[in-house]
Image (tube, rainbow, N blue to C red):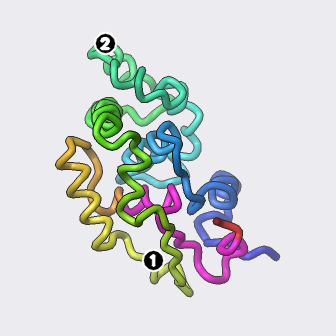
């Protein structure tokens, strides 16, 4: 029997756990935008809910094209708020649009959102060695720093817990427990 982190054992989360979570995403601002969006949408909800709606989010947010999303107007927001296939939280939807705009501003200053975000770890993933999931923190000092900086740059819904989840999602940290079969398969 293959051992996984317990949250990745069900069929909805398994594919994401096994092939994406903790895998470094570099030089792909669209994938980073997707990860940030999914994490902010998850705030207060289960990850399973987000995974069930993932394809719908992709459609709603122009296949993760942050250039297009940055141009969404009030009419677009109203349509999204009525779209029952996604999370219809107005403030979260507005945050996604705002964050797309901030990614463009970051690109102008740093070259890419990837370069901006990965500079916090000098491009290196932090590999943690947790024995149990209870040891995995909800946030860290680095997540607090990145959260503050993202907010300073105008990002929304990026508190330290959401930021740490984003760091896990993009492989800045590898928080698979030691017994997880996928711990060592991530580079």
Q: Counting other residues with Cα less than 10 Å from the Cα at mark 1, is it few (<14), some (14-19), or many (20 or more)?
A: some
Residue 51 image offset from top left, x and y in percent: 57, 46
**Which residue is label 2 attached to?**
75
What's drawn in magenta, residue-wise? 164-184
Query: For residue 136, which numbered disc appears in the image?
Result: 1
Residue 155 image offset from top left, x and y in percent: 25, 43
Tell me how far mark 1 sits from mark 2, CA to CA. Answer: 41 Å
Report whether residue 30 is seen: yes
Q: Quadrant of the N terminus?
A: bottom right
Q: How many numbered dots are placed on residues in this image?
A: 2
> How would you classify the magenta stretch by its main secondary structure?
loop
Q: Is residue 32 left or right of residue 99?
A: right
Badge 1 or badge 2: first in the primary sequence? 2
Name the residue nearer the viewer: 58 or 27. Answer: 27
Instruction: Kindly identify the residue that appears in the image at 35 percent across and 56 percent down.
Output: 162
Instruction: Kindly identify the residue that appears in the image at 68 percent across and 56 percent down.
Output: 19
């Amino acid at each position: 029997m293959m051992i996984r982190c317990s949250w990745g054992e069900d069929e909805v989360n398994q594919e994401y756990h096994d092939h994406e979570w903790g895998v470094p995403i570099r030089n792909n601002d669209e994938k980073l935008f997707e990860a940030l969006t999914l994490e902010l949408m998850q705030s207060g909800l289960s990850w399973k809910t987000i995974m069930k709606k993932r394809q719908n989010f992709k459609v709603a947010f122009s296949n993760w094209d942050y250039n297009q999303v940055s141009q969404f107007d009030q009419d677009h927001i109203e349509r999204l708020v009525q779209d029952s296939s996604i999370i219809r939280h107005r403030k979260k939807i507005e945050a996604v649009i705002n964050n797309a705009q901030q990614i463009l501003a970051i690109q102008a200053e740093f070259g890419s959102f990837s370069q901006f975000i990965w500079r916090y770890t000098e491009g290196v993933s932090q590999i943690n060695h947790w024995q149990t999931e209870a040891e995995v923190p909800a946030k860290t000092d680095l997540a607090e720093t990145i959260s503050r900086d993202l907010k300073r740059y105008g990002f929304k819904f990026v508190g330290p817990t959401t930021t740490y989840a984003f760091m896990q999602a993009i492989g800045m940290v590898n928080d698979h427990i030691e017994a997880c079969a996928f711990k060592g398969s991530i580079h």
